[in-house]
Amino acid sequence: MKKSRELELLDAEHIPKEALYQNLKELKTINSLLGGHKAVLSGYMNFYAYANYKILEIGSGGGDNLGMLKKKFPNNTYAGLDLKEDCISYSKLQDANINWIQENYKHHTPEKPYDIIFNSLFCHHFSDYELVEMLVWMNKNSKKGFFIADLHRHWLAYYSIKFLTKVFSKSYLVKNDAPLSVKRGFTRSEWEKLLERAGIQDYSIRWVWAFRYVITVYK
């Protein structure tokens, strides 16, 4: 499937709060049922040890990935960063004890470095040039390494999510953006080229159901 460069509706600066909240609510369901949380957990387990990690998610959205990790591994310290104010306010309603930060990740300078940084369904919103910048930033600001969970661009994934969201979704954002996200997704070879451009050599790429790649970079 040819890669799309069409912007998603979620990339707009101004989205009605009610529409965004509905979108975040449905994305949590999609992540729960269609492998999003499983992919994040898979990335985390590549670093798992009996330690108290300081973990940051960039592009944290509605916060459901961090909520899932916190339930399984409550001894870690969690922070979520997102550019959208309404995403942060929604996340605080879900769990006020996680450190939610409204900021562009590129401007974020932590007082103490994070052990692990990750993002999920975030990278496909960026150009290749911006992605290389992101990979370099994540590598620089993580002590143990970082991981990424994002979509595998594939025709079956595209038509499946297009059908499912048409039937079950109440969000115009999800109906438009979910299939478009797949078309903006990646192949394994594209990830290999991006990592090479970022000067990163020690990594793994693993495919997980449903149609997601987990990219793990070790320090």
Image (cartoon, helix red, strand yellow):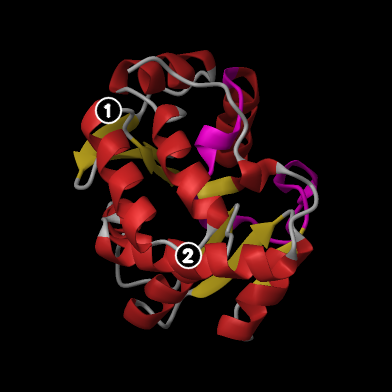
In the rendered structure, the answer to whether residue 122 lies left or right of residue 91 reads left
Residue 104 place in picture, x, y as percent = 76, 48
Can residue 95 be seen at all in this image of the molecule? Answer: no
- Assess whether mark 2 and mark 1 are in contact (beta carbons under 8 angstroms): no
- Crowd band around label 1 with a 10 angstrom C-alpha radius: few (<14), some (14–19), many (20+): some
Which residues lie in the magenta part?
103-128
Above or below for 124 versus 200: below
Q: Quadrant of the C terminus?
A: top left
Of tags 1 and 2, the one toward the viewer is 2
Q: Count up the numbered dots.
A: 2
**Dot 2 corresponds to which residue?**
170
**Amino acid type of disc 2?**
Lys
> Label 1's element?
loop
The one of 29 and 187 positioned closer to us in this rendering? 29
In the rendered structure, the answer to whether residue 138 lies left or right of residue 192 reads right
> Which residue is rendered at x = 67% and y = 42% of the image?
11
**Dot 1 corresponds to which residue?**
154
> Which residue is rendered at x = 32% and y = 22% of the image?
187
Residue 47 place in picture, x, y as percent = 33, 55
> Which residue is rendered at x = 42% and y = 61% of the image?
169
